[in-house]
Amino acid sequence: MTGDVKATSRGIGDMPGVPDGPVTSRVLEGAAMAAAPHLQQHLEQSPEQRRAADIIHLLTLYRPLLDAFIIDFFTEGLWAQLPPAWQPALASATPAQLAGLLRGQGGPGAAWPLSLLAFAAAARALAFPRGCPGGSPRPPCQSSHLHPLLRRHVKPKKQHEIQRLSKLLQGLSQATGCERVVDIGAGQGHLSRFLAFGLGLSVTAVDSDGRLVGLAERFDQELLRELGKTKGLGHKRPPQHPLTPRAPQHVAGRLDPAAPWGEFLLPPNPPAPGPAARNPLGGPGGSEDGGQVLVTGLHACGDLSPALLCHFTRSPAVAAVALVGCCYMKLSTAPQPPGCPLGYPLSASVAALPGHQLSYRAREAACHALEEFEGRLRGGSPHLRAHCYRAVLESLICTADPSKRHLGLQPGRKAHALSFPQYAHLGLPLVGLDPARIPLDSEAVGAMLEQQHKVVAFCTLGQLLAPVVETLILLDRLLYLREQGFHCALVPLFNPQFSPRNLVLVAARTPLATVLAVLDKDREDRDSSEDRHSNEDEDLGEAESPREGQSPHSPGHRPQ
């Protein structure tokens, strides 16, 4: 590697390394002199703006790595494009050592090049802390925090999410005086049901799928019948978590991101039977009785998240919003037809930064579950071979018919349990190719399969950048709100071991310090309870998680 740190578009091998010897001081001195005119401007930026700029600089330097598809590992010779100094260390690394590289914890016998360590350290430093670094990789069990009737039809992961998000919304309700909640993208209504029956809030659940709306209403009626039976039995001992017979109102409708705040609902597609959707913000001052509301979205997909934030900024009816995004690859990016809003970037701060653009591949990478991948590395999981299988299959497909490159196909969820010929016999017909006409046991195929460790190592480098991309997308949303004068914070609310999209964006028209202080106390109480009852040596809240967007002097601040 040389001392030249200029970003190029020629390939991964042009990515910068760390210069050695006396050249280092000269390069750094020259860089400092060149940067001097911009230093004052950099110091005047907020911490969030500086972080966004630093992230974009890192992603620009390593964009070839970020934009590479792992299925092209063999067709585009991705391994040979890595910096030469990285290749021997990565090729000889064990899965456990790769896991250590992800976490910055080293590994038995690991000896990484300094430039690779610098890359990994920069990625970890710029990614927003996700909390719970020592949590258990197993899914949570049935939540004792939920009434048994509210656990029905709800998987443990979802129980974990709705219990913690509901606690946040309860704090927002108390801080703002709002008892009305609009749940956008409510699906089967699990969150809405807990907010209404469990917390006694007035809830309107909105979803674009009329079938899910009908299912949610059926679940509500089941719960009401069970409550009636319980009341009739006259139990002497009241339940630990008593419920109120207050069902949510369900509405079938789509969000119109361009409509005025009082007209943001469109009919569902396809149209649902029954009366047209009523806008839960249709009153003169906000809700139907003129009061304000809280808006939430649990894993609001793609453009739904930025659309909700845009409505919040121009809707005096909305007192606060709590939003968990997902499916970043579905965000609308430039270029778009006139009149179509962008999902990224939202903020003027990020939009003004050269190189802020994120490819589809980069946004898709931001949806990866880093903790799950790290767990597979540490355990030497057979699931890791699926990455190599898919790359080999892509090579065979491109050789047989280049026009079928990059076609989406999923040969099965249990690909890791198959031999490669079995895997190929399932996958090739999905792209219209006959497995009998393609040599699956050739020396070339065998040679590719023997490089599984290299494929896994390349995947690990991409995993290092995935949280950085997610951080940039969420920082863009936070800066968008900040530019318009709102109080906002990013909170790692869920355990990332089993809920990878765990960062909640909270925004309000009034300060959030009280709400965030309640979350801190709840986290401490929950951790103490888990420590007492856990049979394993795990701590789901080992350290208080920092938040992005808090003033250094606010009660919610944590050191970066």
Image (cartoon, helix red, strand yellow):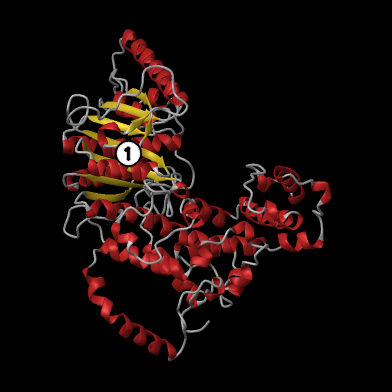
Q: Residue furthest front?
A: 338
- Residue 315 % position (x, y): 23, 39
- Residue 292 % position (x, y): 19, 33
* Location of residue 180 (image quadrant): top left
Note whether residue 107 is visible. Answer: no
Left or right: 90, with 549 as reference point: right
Element class at badge 1? helix
Count of labels in the image: 1
Q: What residue lies at 47% left-to-right and 24% top-to-bottom?
A: 211
- Name the foreground residue: 258 vs 376: 258
- Name the foreground residue: 225 vs 73: 73
- Name the foreground residue: 25 vs 229: 25
Q: Which amino acid lies under the numbered mark 1 shown in the image of this protein?
A: Leu
Q: What residue lies at 46% left-to-right and 57% top-to-bottom?
A: 466
- Residue 254 % position (x, y): 39, 32
Please say if 229 is above or below 172: above
The 10 Å Cα crowd at callout 1, few under 14, some 14 to 19, many 20 or more, is many
Please say if 492 is above or below 280: below
Note whether residue 91 is visible. Answer: yes
Left or right: 101, with 404 as reference point: left
Q: Which residue position holds label 1? A: 165
Q: What residue lies at 54% left-to-right and 63% top-to-bottom?
A: 98
Please say if 118 is above or below 289: below
Left or right: 504, with 135 as reference point: left
Please say if 170 is above or below 520: above
Question: Which image quadrant: the C terminus?
Answer: bottom left
Q: Residue furthest bottom?
A: 22
- Name the foreground residue: 512 vs 509: 509
